[in-house]
Image (spheres, coloured by chain):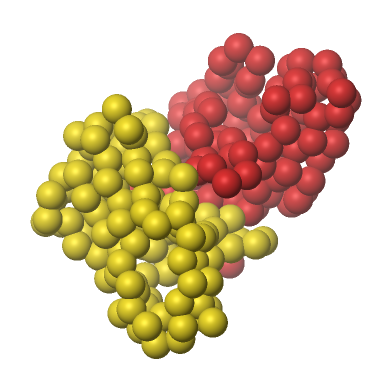
Chain colours: A yellow, B red
Amino acid sequence: NAGVTQTPKFQVLKTGQSMTLQCAQDMNHEYMSWYRQDPGMGLRLIHYSVGAGITDQGEVPNGYNVSRSTTEDFPLRLLSAAPSQTSVYFCASSYSGADSDTQYFGPGTRLTVL
Amino acid sequence: DQQVKQNSPSLSVQEGRISILNCDYTNSMFDYFLWYKKYPAEGPTFLISISSIKDKNEDGRFTVFLNKSAKHLSLHIVPSQPGDSAVYFCAAGSGTYKYIFGTGTRLKVLA
C-alpha cells in the first residue's frame, strides 16, 4: 500500500496561473479532504468529500475547486493562483470520515505563488 | 475566531521527563478530539484520540486527558524521548466531517 500520495512535492506559480494538485489513496477510503497549513494558523480544511461524486466546502474554500470522480482520486484545482494561496497543502483520507476514524495524510505539496 | 487553540508555540523538555502539551477549545459541540504528530517535510500522523464520554485515554507512553467543563485537553508523554521531537497538533470534531486543528506546539526533547 502506498497510502496517500500527493504530486507534485513542490510547485512555483505566477499570479493568475492555474494548476491541479493531485491526491490519490489506495486504501479504498470513502472520505478525503484537503487542508492548507500556514505559519501560525495550523491546518485549515479547504474541501472534503464523503464519497465519489460528493464534495463539500470546508473552512477556506474560496479560490479552490475539487471533484471526486473516483474513490481513489481527489484533485484540488487552483483556477487563478494568488500570492495568498502560497502554503503547504495536505490531502488526507479516512475510511468513513467519522470522528473516530484515523485520518491518513499525504506528504504535502509546497506551493509558492509569485 | 479560533475554535481550537494551542497557546504554547514551543516546548523544550529533557529526555526522560514528562512532556505536557495543552489544547483549549471553545465549541461545546465538539465530541471527539485527536492529537497528531508532524515531522518536517512529512504529513501529520495520528497519535491518539479521545471521545467526550471519556476523560482519559492511554496508549503506551502517550496519555490524553479531557476536561470537558474547562474545555481543555492535554497530551502527556512519559518518558519523553528525542524521537518525540516534532510539532503536535490537536484537532476536534463534532460528527460533521469537519475537523478543526489547533496551531501546533513544537516539542523539542533534549538528550
Name the residue: 59% across, 51% down.
Answer: B102
Q: Which residue, as the protein is rendered here, is positioned at the far bottom?
A: A16
Residue A64 shown left or right of residue B109 in the figure: left
Percent from the top left, x then y, of residue A40?
67, 61
Name the residue: 74% across, 17% down.
Answer: B78
Towards the viewer: B50 or A66: A66
When asked about the image quadrant of residue A103, the answer is: top left
Quadrant for the N terminus of chain B in the image:
bottom right
Percent from the top left, x then y, of residue B90?
58, 42
When asked about the image quadrant of residue A79, the answer is: bottom left
Percent from the top left, x then y, of residue B3?
56, 57
Q: Is residue A107 above or below residue A87?
A: above
Name the residue: 45% across, 77% down.
Answer: A13
Percent from the top left, x then y, of residue B66?
60, 31
Quadrant for the C terminus of chain B in the image:
top right
Q: Is residue B8 above or below residue B83?
A: below
Name the residue: 86% across, 28% down.
Answer: B110
